[in-house]
Image (spheres, helix red, strand yellow):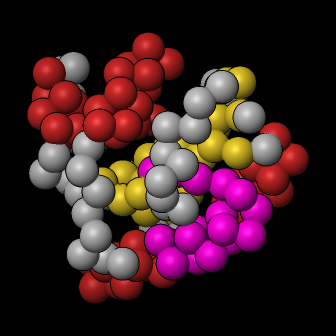
Amino acid sequence: MQQICYASTSTSDHVQLLQDVRDILSEARDFNAVHNISGVLYYADQHYFQCLEGDEAALELLMLKLLKDPRHKDIKVFEAKTIHVAHFRAWGMKYVQRMSSVHTKMREMGFATFEPQSMSQQQIDQLLQDLYDAQPDESLC
């Protein structure tokens, strides 16, 4: 099983953003259920961070789809890893809200805003630890 994470910048304006996040979550949950993928989505300060877990071929297919999605740009893909335990298996796509332990962790790392494209792999690994433990936000489901 593989884990791949990426960060991107939203292209949505303020009016469209909430609907786009809802659509992304809905589409992700549908696609992921068919392809046995699980993951987490975090959004703050015009940036998305998503971590996906599943079969390597399914993740490659999904990444090709994501790279063409007009709702985001400036995509940075982080190191793909082989994992033995799926951390997000309970969710087709877990969504973590901005005001969570992740927000606090970002401040502790010295970021005034959420800037995942500027983070090192070590910082991404720390972010993932918080995302593993964070309570999901079910309000956008």
* Most foreground residue, 86 or 99: 86
Give the magenta-colored segment's residue range.
25-40
**63 is higher (above) or lower (below) than 20:** above
Question: At which x and y percent is residue 66?
Answer: 67, 60
**37 is higher (above) or lower (below) than 103:** below
Question: At which x and y percent is residue 18?
Answer: 31, 79
**100 is higher (above) or lower (below) than 81:** below
Tell me the residue at 87%/47% (across/down). 57
| Left or right: 128 as drawn, with respect to 85 | left
Q: Quadrant of residue 115?
A: top left
- Does 22 lie within the magenta span? no
Q: Quadrant of residue 15?
A: bottom left
Question: At which x and y percent is residue 45?
Answer: 26, 53
Tell me the residue at 31%/76% (across/down). 140
Question: At which x and y percent is residue 130?
Answer: 29, 32
Do we see residue 69 in this rendering?
no
Tell me the residue at 64%/37% (across/down). 4
| Left or right: 95 as drawn, with respect to 38 | left
Looking at the rendered structure, the number of numbered marks drawn on it comes to 0
Which residue in the rendered view is the most extreme toward the right?
Answer: 57
Do we see residue 98 in this rendering?
yes
- Does 30 lie within the magenta span? yes
* Most foreground residue, 38 or 124: 38
| Rendered-image quadrant of the C terminus | bottom left
